[in-house]
Image (cartoon, rainbow, N blue to C red):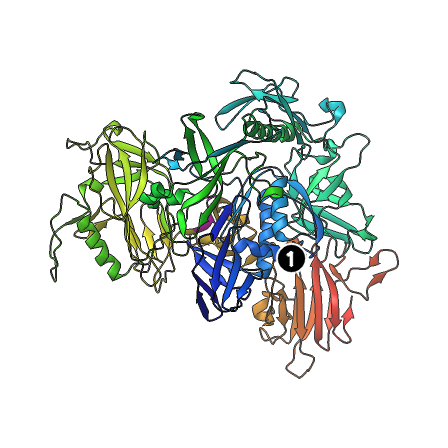
Amino acid sequence: MVIHFGNTELEVKAEDNSYRLRAVKGVDKLVLYYSLTHHVEIPLGAWVEYEGQVFTLLKASNFTKNSTRNFSYTLTLEYDWARSGRYKCKNPVDGRLKFAYTAKPHEFVQLLVDNMNLRESGWTVGECIETAEQVISFNHVYCSDALNMIADAFETEWEVIGKTINLRKVEYFKDNPLPLSYGRGNGFKTEISRSNQSGQQAVEILYVQGGTDNIDPSKYGNSELLLPKNQELVYEGCNYISSADGLYIKRKDKELVSRCEDSLDCSAIYPKRVGSVSSVVVVDANMHFYDFIDTSIPNELDFADCLIAGETMTVIFQTGMLAGKELEVKYKHNERRFEIVPQDIDGQTMPNDIFKPVIGDKYAVFHIALPNAYVCNNSDKSGASWDMFRDAARYLYEHEGNLFTFKGVLDGIWAKKDWLNIGGRIRIGAYVMFSDEQFNPEGSLIRIVSVKDYCNNPHSPIIELSNAPVTSSFQNAMNKVVESEVVIDNKHRDAIQFTKRRYRDSQETIEMLREAMLDNFTESISPIAVQTMAMLIGDKSLQFGFVDNMTSPTPVPHNVTYNQTTKVLTVSDGIIQHYTLGIDTISSSHAVEEYKFWSLPAFNTPPLTDSDKKFYLYAKVSTTNQTGQFYISETAIALDAVPGYYHLLVGMLNTEFDGNRSYVSLYGFSEVLPGQVRTNKIISSDGKTYFDLLLGEIGGRILFKNGLISGLIGIGNEDGINAGMNGGGTSDEDVRIWAGAKESKKDTAPFRVLHDGSMYATRGIFSGFLQVPFMDIDLAAKYEGRDSEYRSCYVVSDHFNIKTSISAGSYSLVLRLPYDRKLDGVVLNVFDNPIKTRSSPTLWIQGDTDAGGFGNIYHPNSLDSVMGFKPIKEIYCPRGGFIQFICVSGNWMVTSNMMPESEIK
């Protein structure tokens, strides 16, 4: 074992009791015991690599001086997430350490990710459960404690892989459990122990009590939210039914025996709509009058009509500076506008210039009775009642059986024989099918919740199996825990990885192919050149592919990735269709029933730490049914070498070189004909650039030096296009670049650039400076000809930094400010050179005149004793200078006047 610190590498011999401990809801740690003949101080930050993981020393080591030449050391090194115990969890908006936060699971994880990235980069949000919002109060807690609080609030677990935080139940291989039982050759050694969870009974009837907010008892008929009445819900293959009064649930497909009851508090679930602020109107900052608008409120939801008699409508902001604050509001539905009533909170009047709503803040409305669609919609199983039903079904599913724990030591001799295919399945959360012919003959599907493997004997770890997940309060003592699981949104997109491939890898692959016992080929040839009319690359036995189903199969990509850091090969699950096995006739088409199909579960290897070994990846599939599994081997296996199975060669993993291995897939074929190539992938030698023709995907950095990309280019994610570039059309109004909207909505996207160069943006943050140069009047404004006094007349058009110049042979210029509401918010700057010569022009600024003879210019020197400002028609600027206007609803307000001796009328 090598300990790294600074520029030092200290090699020590780990004693037999040194171990690695992995546990659900716990930080992986490596405990090293070793002895030295002299003292070496191991500094904080020292690290050790073991089984593809890097463990860091975060706490001072312990040592004992047995004699002058005998020092015994104990080092406890921990994985990445352990550093979260150093950092306090702060509100990302204002830095408070004591705050309440209302959010969904992925938003809470984002809170932790933001906190961690404040101290060290690279942290990301992983998989999260999908359920209703919760309110969690943080009070000077560390990020590590905050994660436990979040998991407890949502009754789930967490797992940190590298720097990715996942909030979900930790489980793997549920559909392909590793079979384990007692006895020689069966997995477990002697002394298997089972302990039942004390105080736990198998529940058959579950009472559920919902929240009280946003419910009008006089109309709803109950003061708390009820379950959907007499409705059914299928969860994990079990059918649950709610009672006719909406108070409890039970299994429909199972008779009651014990009638044991339990209850679930769902008071955090109630009818609500979480909205988002789309704009803010500061009516009067001095009076603390702030309004906000949410344009996404549907037309049928008028909050004013939902008010409960005798109550006052309020909003509670879920995010932003007002998060957790409850403020009285008035609502105007035609404007989708909330008027906030100022309120004294924490010694100050809110809202104010600090504690105020901003665009993007989330909020919820209270003391209203929302329409039935938000309460209980049986047609599509939506609304708060159905959210509560799903939570209740999940809870009952996890508590209707007896909870127990098994402990045992894996048989090292049995495991070592096939460690490549077993080791990757000995991980936290992996399911095993545990059986014993005496006390558990039917077998139980049960999870691994802790693994303690000894450094000098890694093939014989101590494994704890339990159908009860670990709670935060007992995360380091995994004997007595309470079962809790939530529904996981299983949406994810597998990362496509193409490893760097060198010439030596190709040579090694050729040697491995020689050993692979493919029957249809002779030895390789090595000519200087090959001239031929056709080339077919591939073997008949390897003509298979991965498809989406077995009834109407469509080819789909399949991912095999090798992690160069953890040294683990990961194979995703899939369905294989073989195109030649069993096909004995030549035909233009074959029925689906003629092909052979197999379904294979996902597969992980243990860390492949021996850099000199190369591996074959096979699909080991049955010759009699449609099942199979992925299998890795150091030696080649012929197609039908094992009775009852086909071994289909999926790919090869080369030996390690310069710290990297290269994986290459081998199934399918490539055809080269004059003028065309048929294949599935084209990959660069470094693996960074690829054309996946089957998936229709291009990856990597590609430089288009010269050429034309026509049509529309979309940018987006699994939900579809949300930005892009468009080359279609020739109109000035055609959108060329847009962001924040679907392709069909690009003409109204929050950010867009038009063909004529116009840019529209709903919001923006700029650093540095913005420069809009002044332009001569004959270029900046639209020329209208000469008036009766032979003055050159211009009207403000689409440039608003204007300077005067001699134009159209005239020394007299008129600049007209039009009454045009489209110019609302425009700031107009006009510069007339104050150094007057014989060739300098004279400027008149005129407004539009209405039917009553009033102009549309407002000047601070034109006042009315009754009406305030008195509109004027014209400003004469004989001396030149600078003047600034802002357009408000078609009228032009003078905001700065540096035109000396200017005259108004």
Comparing 459 with 732, the one in front is 459
- Give the residues drawn in magenta, as a range: 714-719
Near mark 1 (Cα within 10 A), the count class, few <14, some 14-19 or many ≥20, is some
- What is the x, y in percent for residue 463? 46, 41
The residue lying toward the viewer, choosing from 287 and 220, is: 220
Q: Label 1 amino acid?
A: Leu
Question: Taking 236 as reference, is 285 above or below it?
Answer: below
Above or below, 844 against 637 in this view is below
Quarter occupied by the C terminus = bottom right
**Closest to the observer: 238 or 905?**
238
Residue designated by label 1:
823
Residue 610 visible in this rendered orientation of the protein: yes
- Horizontally, is 691 left or right of 381 in the view? left
In the image: residue 867, left or right of residue 611: right
Residue 493 in the image: state x and y as whole percent. Answer: 44, 45
Out of 630 and 493, give the one closest to the viewer: 630
Q: Residue at x 66, y 84 (%)?
A: 838
As drawn, the residue found furthest toward the bottom would be 837
The residue sitting at the front extreme is 67
Q: Secondary structure at mark 1?
A: helix
Query: Compared with residue 586, is residue 36 higher up or lower down, i.e. above or below?
Result: below
Q: Residue 25's image quarter?
A: top right
Where does the image place residue 16, in percent across and percent down from the top left?
44, 53
